[in-house]
Image (cartoon, rainbow, N blue to C red):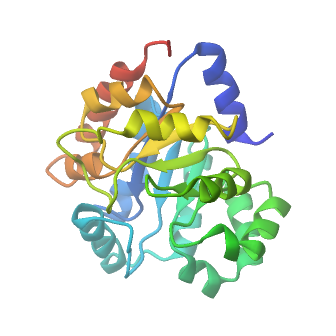
Amino acid sequence: MNRIEEKFVELGTQQRAALMPYLPLGYPTVEESQDLIRVIADAGADMIELGVPFSDPLADGPVIQHATQVALKNGVTLAKCLAMARAARDAGVTIPLILMGYANPILRYGIAAFARDAQNAGVDGLIVPDLPPEEAGAFDAATRAHDLALIFLAAPTSTPERLQKIAAATRGFVYLVSVVGVTGARAQLAADLSSFVARVRAITSKPVCVGFGIANAESARQVAQIADGVIVGSALVNKIGNGNAIQAAREFIAELRGAINHKIE
C-alpha cells in the first residue's frame, strides 16, 4: 500500500474527502514553487498534484498554459521536477505527491528510468492526460515495478464500456473530468456532475476524485459531498500568480480545507 492508498484509508475513517491542489512546478518562480509545496501541505492539502511543464498542454486552459510557459522559461525540466519532489521530501513533506505531465517528456527521459527516479524522489503517482489505457502497457509495467499509482482520466462523454476500461486500469483513484473541455475555473459546476459520479461509482469501488472547473470554496464543498477527492488547479494558479504567492496559497488552501472538512454523508 503506497501513500495514496494509505491516505484514502485514513480519509475513509474520517469520512472526509481529499483536498488535492494542482501546482505547476516552476511557477511563478522555481524558488517560490519549491516553497509552495511545503506551504500547501502545511495549510491542509491531503495530496498534491505536481504539474510538469510541457510546450503543448492539450488538456489545459489558458491559466495553466500560461503558468507552464513561464515554468519552461524558468528552465524547468522533468529532471528538475523530480529534484523538486525529492527536495520537498527532504523538507519534511509527507503527504502523497503525484506528478501530472504529458507523455512526450517521459518517453524522452525513458519510461523505466523515469519510474525508478520518481520512486527514488518520493513520488507516489502519475497522471498522463494524453495517455489512453490502450497504449499504457509500458507505463503500467514500469510504474507497477516502482510502486507508483498510474491514474487515468474519465470524461463525461466516456461511454460505459470506456469507463469500465478506465476504472479497471487506474490505480490510486479515478480522475473524473467534470466538464467537456480544458482545465479552468467555471462559474458553476456541471449540472450532470452528480450523475457522472454515480455512473463511475456503480462500476468501481476505487476512490473517485473530481477535477477541472472547481473555482472556489463553495464549488469545492459541493464536490466533496459526492466525491472522494476535490482537485483544484486553475483557481489556485490564479491566486499565486497575482501578488504574494506564498500568502495567497496558504490562505486559499486553508479556505478550501475549511469548506470540505465536513464528513461525507
Q: Position of residue 126 (x, y in %)?
A: 62, 59
Instruction: Quadrant for residue 195, please give it.
Output: top left
Is residue 144 something that shows in the picture? yes
Quick check: 262 above or below 95? above
Residue at 47% over, 67% down: 52
Is residue 95 something that shows in the picture? no
Q: Nearer the viewer, residue 79 or 48?
A: 48
Q: Nearer the viewer, residue 143 or 210?
A: 210
Q: Position of residue 190 (x, y in %)?
A: 30, 42
Residue at 52% over, 34% down: 198
Quick check: 48 above or below 264? below
Instruction: Quadrant for residue 260, please give it.
Output: top left
Instruction: Quadrant for residue 76, please give it.
Output: bottom left
Residue at 66% over, 23% down: 10
Residue, far bottom: 108
Would you say 200 lies left or right of 69 here? right
